[in-house]
Amino acid sequence: MAYINDNYSKLQASYLFSDIAKRVAAFTEANPGKEVIKMGIGDVTEPLPAVCRQAFHDAIDEMGTRDGFHGYGPEQGYAFLRETIAQNEFSARGCDIQANEIFVSDGSKCDCGNIQEIFSEQSKVAIPDPVYPVYVDTNVMAGRTGQNSDGRYDGLVYLESTTENGYIPSPPSEKVDMIYLCFPNNPTGTCATREQLQAWVDYAKDCGAIILFDAAYESFIRDPEIPHSIYELDGARECAIEFRSFSKNAGFTGTRCAYTVIPEGLTALDGNNESVSLHQLWNRRHTTKFNGVSYPVQKAAAAVYTEEGKAEVKALTNFYMENAALILKTMKELGFACAGGTNAPYVWIKTDAPSWEFFDRLLNESAIVCTPGAGFGTCGENHFRLSAFNSRQNVELAMERIRKAFA
Amino acid sequence: MAYINDNYSKLQASYLFSDIAKRVAAFTEANPGKEVIKMGIGDVTEPLPAVCRQAFHDAIDEMGTRDGFHGYGPEQGYAFLRETIAQNEFSARGCDIQANEIFVSDGSKCDCGNIQEIFSEQSKVAIPDPVYPVYVDTNVMAGRTGQNSDGRYDGLVYLESTTENGYIPSPPSEKVDMIYLCFPNNPTGTCATREQLQAWVDYAKDCGAIILFDAAYESFIRDPEIPHSIYELDGARECAIEFRSFSKNAGFTGTRCAYTVIPEGLTALDGNNESVSLHQLWNRRHTTKFNGVSYPVQKAAAAVYTEEGKAEVKALTNFYMENAALILKTMKELGFACAGGTNAPYVWIKTDAPSWEFFDRLLNESAIVCTPGAGFGTCGENHFRLSAFNSRQNVELAMERIRKAFA
């Protein structure tokens, strides 16, 4: 008789986006003429860079010839992509990361979700709050938590991001085994300084923990003092795995390409207290459960590192950052306390009202959709997120409406 | 202190393809002028169909406009693809499968590997021998087996495919919870008849087991009596999940698109012996750990179902099946007992010699690479696999050399 994985029964249904959709639908029905502007979305809106499209087209033409046809590729990604990533993202910043330490995949969500498989079921896991829900849910599914009560799972260590700590949690007093960190942060848009990140690396090395560092938004960093990669910090090669993506820099959310960095020499212990290479473990997982990223997609991703590609990505991220600046300026002028928006495409805004109440007010008075902070965790209450991923016209119109409602 | 998932330590290193590569390299070094023909490969060789390339190109052009840009899509796949799959692969064959029961993914290897996550860790698993190693290894990683001894894992039920049963195992006498089946089979090339498959469905319903049916090679079936889908059998909707792929029919091994069918209403029990929908459980897993297939790739896949696409796929699979016929004819004329090759792109050949010994003879005498059967499991000993995925020229030359060596 087939039985299910009972850990799935512990999962809380995620009503955030369906709740938002329901409220928007109700509003639209009651206000048929009113155009709703969606400022809550974490998805890019601008066209795929021309240089990526050209490389994409060329690869498809290759696939139409017997000599240029590509079947199964290396599961870890083609050398042409791994090498240009290693050079441009890491060597160029002084990080000691080699091409063979990069695993190309079809998405950071997959990698962030799957990485926990190579760790013990008994691991103690530290998770930010507010948080991208994938870190939590995949550990619940794997049995690393107890039941949920009041929105928190037993057994997890929550790293609280609050106004008091500027939304950058410090290492906890207790020891943990796995730590999820995300900078620039989703949803708060905050960035850890070099000193703050170094404290995390030192803590992890001290207690033998592994940092799972999600750097999906690094291309929005403008302050030269802020690290783009955890490997810019001393000792990170001995305690950190990093997740990167082409989704937000080059607009690949619908094209699908990402990568994970696992330094050779990074280890954890087996049941006999012997050190085991996490690089080799992940390689075994990756080659057993994954068959590589589409060859034309890898060609499109590699084009990001041509001179033309770098210029297009810069222009694309600049465009969104101009949106972010517009949002941040408006909200500050209206007297809201804000985080993010200068080195990240999200603005995290404090409000006295409960976040769903604020959501309703913004929708009903201004026909604007935000993301209520409570949807990202307990510490998201009394906050809401505005996203810079939109057309300029929409952002300008939205800010005008907000000024009218809150001035 | 971070600890690893100790189940990984039970995994046997897979030396099959690296051993083959080593022996081929040694031969090539010793015989520099001799051209080696690789007849062991399970990867397609012919160009991507023109109609798929055109749809692929068109989608990329769309991605270059703001109106046509596609960001995150539905994780389960776009309706345009799910609907045409449901219509052409299932409704057209009289199978009651709806579009919303189809989960589009980037590969059958991923789906076959990930599906076990939604089942209990205590499940008793039946696995064919010889077998595609992914079914075994992913269950080892998840802790559903004991240690390996003499090539077999404690706790698994092995379904032996032998000359005696025509390489089609019957249901075992004991009860199991999960059953992996693959028809047309890799590596044996055999197909279960309607009656044989019905016996499996009846057995599964009887003991409440779930059949995980891998139909990646169904497009090579030429005999109209052989089922292409498990859902052609009575009762399969209540006991079976099916895996399909565009890899082998349309040559998508390097383009990446596949799908998994989970009927609504298919259930397993939770710890309280309540029925839980496996469709909903997989939906939760799929949306949490996966972000959808590349939009241009989904467009390319949908083109397979245009009139032109169907003609191209037919021509492509016919081409490989002509190769298979050539291989089968030659090996039979030389007196080898063979399976497969008529409704599958693999010919499974019996030999008195140990399979690695035969591999060496074929390599050294004929400069031909086969896949030694022992690499697929205990029951693969004294067999080898020849693949029809090759150019006509290579297949003709290979058969000529084999005739010379074995006549």
Image (spheres, coloured by chain):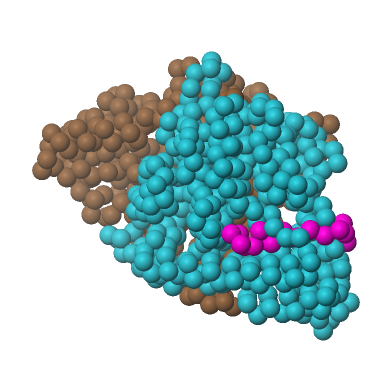
Chain colours: A cyan, B brown
**In this view of the protein, can residue B47 be seen by the observer?**
yes
The quadrant in which the N terminus of chain B is found is: top right
> Is residue A342 located in the magenta-colored stretch of the structure?
yes
**In the displayed structure, would residue A233 be above or below residue A79?**
above
Left or right of residue B118, residue A24 in this image: right
Depth check: give the residue in front, B184 or A110.
A110
The spot of residue B298 in percent (x, y) is 54, 63
> In which image quadrant can residue B340 be found?
top left
**In the displayed structure, would residue B236 be above or below residue B172?**
below
The quadrant in which the C terminus of chain B is found is: top left
Left or right of residue A273, residue B383 in this image: left
> Is residue A403 located in the magenta-colored stretch of the structure?
no
**In this view of the protein, can residue B158 be seen by the observer?**
no
Depth check: give the residue in front, B17 or A56.
A56
Residue pictured at 15% horizontal, 36% vertical: B29
The spot of residue B333 in percent (x, y) is 27, 40
> In which image quadrant can residue B79 be found?
bottom right
Depth check: give the residue in front, B210 or B320.
B210
Left or right of residue A364, residue A233 in this image: left
Number of marks in the rendered image? 0
The spot of residue A353 in percent (x, y) is 88, 59
Report the magenta residues as a range.
A340-357
Depth check: give the residue in front, A316 or A66.
A316
Left or right of residue A137, residue B291 in this image: left
The spot of residue B72 in percent (x, y) is 61, 62
Residue pictured at 73% horizontal, 38% vertical: A158
